[in-house]
Image (cartoon, rainbow, N blue to C red):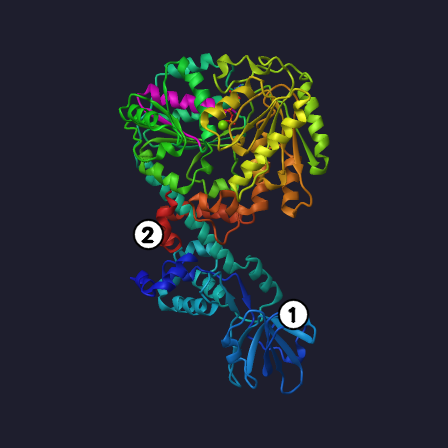
């Protein structure tokens, strides 16, 4: 019913929806960004430069001036003191001229600055007032808003929403909880935040601004509590669903383990046990497998897949990019064809005929294992016996894709998500609290640490020379058998020696140009030409790999690189995830300042995989912005994925860290994941207690905070 009263005012409802207000009661939780003090009037003679204030005066003159540019200038004066103030408008409407007529009394609010003719305010808020018009008694809230929705309109709507229905400010928490945690009452907190009393003491004012005031604490607590409740509800819903029990008989997994040329690390053993255990249960697994770049997640995924296949079920393995999906295909094909499991391949660029064949094989249940990009989610692809869905680099999939996954009946399958982007503890506690997490916290043996160098573009010529030398040199240590992505480890012992060389191999990463794929391509081609020429004399072959190439062209280039026929591989960020060529021990990243921390870490993870000493050169262009400098400093100082993720969270904030549009979770509006860790923990405990003691209150609380947005959360 309440929803209706908003919906009736059609365009207004649209605007409100844009700021996340879907129901009238959402206005109660639409809290101010800051406040303005309109409760006092500073006499004109006391107006000081660099202050934000409200004053009042009589319009003496008002005119449009044309120099240095068109503007509307109005002079107001105090009758008593002769002090004056200039109001300056660079954008204005006829209405400005109409109301600011000589003789009118105006009340003005804004930042005072020093002008040519004394103090002035540019684009002040102003209002023509009567002689003795009363002042507001509370601080004036400034709300987050959107185009076409004025502060005044929002203030009125909110004030009305606050009093129209007491249910909107009703307490959802048991008295006992509120008292024990020393929380403000909900109604008191929202009333205070929407309309704080004037003349707060400095300490209170500061707490209000910094959002550490008890009124804010109550709101943050409630927000976090709602989030925890929603995650728990989600989990409960999952527990009531049924997935196939994948007992397995160990034949295929055992055979794979015998075939790979390495022993699982202890971390891999442990994680594999955790997953194997989950798969044997009827509750759908939702496990996140975290492991830094190169920690060996793929073999664990392969084992999980085989357990499902042993149990007569199908497996879908999805990767976010075509090149990564292809790498998985090659590696898994190498491993699984040996144990007699065929793989169906599905990607967006597959010719129609092959695609149809693959789809048929999957639909009939004849093909047990599908690998692909999000083409796997697409219409027409059915896997009637789907038992396990594996999603690599899960955070790179968008909400829409995850929704499609849900519609595919994957909710009734086990899910294994993999990510090399470690999630900081606070995020794990909040956004990912519904997942079980397995950690690969140990690297396979034989890795060598990567040395990182920061080099200015000014020294580019030197860099090119150094790289050329490194390519010609024999590698310091004999390179271990490269794991050919084409054939899998078992046929690996080829490496760079096949091409007749033992020099070091180099990834040369093109600058990232997010705005234009075309420009990025041109840059890649130009860079390839530049390096080909620079290295021609020394017989160093340079290859090029970019996203626009056909899959078989890409494959051919990768193969040539793996075999050592190419020493330098110029690549766009298509190599960001997953690519695996152990003999490549140098990486040069052009315009490293344009990349995000996670990206740099992922890229750098492509080297340091063999025995040779590895170097990552970050070429940067000066001048650097502040955040770029911070990022490069972090990546220079540490190679620990967790520390990097934590720093990333600090530099970027959780919204961007998760990719607000990508995350599928409404981000926290008020609580701060770095600063409010203690509150998160309290909210988590309180959520358990509340669900136990008063499920009705919990439901009411959830509805208040997430009412209109529930569907989104499930994504
Ligand atoms: P990521 O976790 O980044 O996906 P991969 O699964 O691609 O890492 O593994 C990186 C490389 O390490 C691959 O070549 C893989 O075959 C190899 N590898 C995996 N586990 C081990 C191990 N226990 N010992 C030695 N090499 C391993
Ligand atoms: Mg991987």
In the rendered image, the residue lying farthest to the left is 364
Please give the count of numbered marks on the rendered protein: 2
Name the residue beneath numbered marker 2.
696
Q: Secondary structure at mark 2?
A: helix
Up the image or down, 193 lies above or below 261; here it is below
Could you tell me residue 396's position as x and y percent? 46, 37
Q: Quadrant of residue 309?
A: top left
Left or right for 139, reference 80: left
Left or right for 235, reference 667: left
Could you tell me residue 565's position as x and y percent? 58, 18
Depth order, front residue of 194/189:
194
Name the residue beneath numbered marker 1.
68
Please name the residue shown 71% across and 26% down the image.
466
Left or right for 44, reference 164: right
Please name the residue shown 62% across and 69% down the image.
69
Task: Give the numbered dot on residue 313.
Answer: none
Could you tell me residue 527's position as x and y percent? 61, 33
Looking at the image, can residue 462 be seen?
yes
Which mark sits nearer the N-terminus, 2 or 1?
Answer: 1
Q: Residues within 10 Å of mark 2 (few under 14, many from 20)?
A: few
Q: Residues within 10 Å of mark 1 (few under 14, many from 20)?
A: few
Q: Secondary structure at mark 1?
A: loop
Looking at the image, can residue 641 be seen?
no
Depth order, front residue of 513/184:
513
Up the image or down, 585 lies above or below 640; here it is above
Could you tell me residue 250's position as x and y percent? 37, 16
> Magenta span covers which residues?
296-319
Quarter of the figure with the C terminus: top left
Up the image or down, 489 lies above or below 635; here it is above
């Amino acid at each position: 019913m309440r929803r209706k009263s908003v919906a009736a005012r059609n365009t207004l409802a649209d605007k409100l929806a844009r700021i996340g207000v879907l129901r009238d009661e959402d206005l109660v939780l639409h809290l101010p960004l800051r406040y303005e003090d309109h409760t006092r009037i500073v006499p004109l003679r006391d107006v000081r430069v660099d202050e934000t204030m409200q004053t009042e005066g009589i319009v003496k003159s008002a005119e449009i001036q044309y120099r240095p540019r068109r503007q509307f200038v109005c002079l107001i004066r105090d009758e008593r003191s002769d002090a004056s103030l200039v109001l300056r408008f660079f954008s204005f409407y006829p209405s400005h001229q109409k109301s600011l007529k000589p003789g009118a009394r105006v009340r003005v609010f804004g930042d005072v600055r020093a002008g040519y003719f004394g103090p002035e305010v540019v684009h002040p808020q102003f209002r023509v007032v009567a002689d003795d018009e009363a002042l507001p008694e509370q601080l004036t809230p400034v709300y987050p808003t959107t185009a076409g929705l004025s502060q005044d309109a929002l203030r009125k709507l909110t004030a009305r929403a606050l009093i129209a229905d007491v249910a909107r400010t009703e307490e959802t928490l048991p008295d006992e909880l509120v008292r024990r945690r020393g929380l403000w009452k909900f109604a008191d907190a929202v009333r205070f935040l929407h309309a704080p009393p004037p003349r707060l003491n400095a300490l209170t004012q500061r707490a209000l601004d910094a959002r550490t005031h008890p009124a804010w604490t109550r709101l943050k607590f409630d927000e976090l509590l709602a989030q925890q409740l929603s995650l728990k509800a989600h989990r409960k819903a999952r527990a009531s669903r049924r997935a196939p029990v994948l007992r397995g008989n160990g034949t295929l997994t055992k055979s794979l383990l015998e075939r790979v040329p390495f022993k699982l690390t202890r971390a891999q053993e442990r994680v594999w046990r955790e997953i194997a255990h989950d798969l044997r249960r009827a509750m759908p697994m939702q496990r996140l497998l975290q492991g830094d770049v190169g920690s060996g997640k793929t073999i664990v995924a392969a084992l999980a897949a085989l357990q499902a296949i042993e149990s007569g079920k199908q497996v879908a393995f999805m990767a976010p990019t075509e090149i990564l999906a292809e790498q998985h295909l090659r590696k898994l094909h190498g491993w699984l064809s040996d144990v007699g499991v065929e793989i169906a391949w599905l990607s967006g660029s597959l010719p129609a005929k092959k695609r149809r064949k693959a789809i048929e094989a999957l639909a009939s249940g004849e093909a047990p294992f599908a690998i692909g990009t999000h083409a796997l989610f697409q219409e027409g692809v059915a896997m009637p016996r789907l038992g396990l869905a594996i999603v690599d680099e899960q955070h790179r999939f968008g909400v829409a894709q995850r929704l499609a996954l849900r519609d595919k009946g994957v909710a009734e399958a086990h899910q294994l998500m993999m990510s090399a982007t470690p999630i900081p503890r606070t995020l794990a506690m909040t956004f990912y609290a519904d997942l079980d997490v397995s950690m690969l916290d140990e690297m396979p043996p034989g890795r060598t640490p990567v040395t990182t160098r920061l080099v200015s573009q000014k020294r580019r010529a030197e860099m090119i020379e150094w790289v050329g030398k490194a390519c010609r040199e024999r590698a310091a240590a004999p390179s271990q058998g490269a794991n050919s992505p084409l054939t899998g480890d078992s046929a690996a012992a080829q490496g760079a020696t096949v091409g007749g060389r033992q020099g070091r191999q180099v990834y040369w990463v093109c600058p990232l140009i997010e705005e234009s794929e075309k420009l990025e391509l041109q840059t890649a081609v130009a860079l390839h030409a530049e390096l080909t020429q620079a290295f021609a004399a020394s017989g160093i072959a340079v290859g090029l790999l970019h996203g626009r190439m056909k899959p078989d062209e890409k494959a051919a280039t990768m193969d040539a690189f793996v075999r050592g026929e190419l020493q330098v591989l110029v690549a766009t960020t298509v190599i960001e995830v997953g690519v695996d060529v152990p003999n490549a021990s140098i990486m040069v990243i052009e315009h490293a300042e344009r990349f995000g921390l996670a990206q740099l870490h992922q890229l750098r993870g492509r080297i340091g995989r063999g025995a040779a000493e590895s170097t990552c050169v970050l070429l940067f262009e000066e001048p650097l912005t502040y955040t770029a400098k911070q990022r490069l400093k972090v990546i220079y100082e540490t190679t620990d994925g967790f520390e990097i993720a934590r720093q990333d969270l600090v530099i970027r904030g959780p919204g961007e860290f998760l990719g607000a549009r990508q995350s599928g979770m409404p981000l926290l509006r008020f609580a701060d994941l770095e600063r409010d860790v203690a509150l998160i923990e309290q909210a988590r405990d309180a959520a358990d207690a509340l669900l136990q003691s008063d499920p009705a209150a919990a439901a009411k609380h959830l509805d208040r905070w997430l009412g209109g947005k529930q569907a989104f959360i499930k994504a």
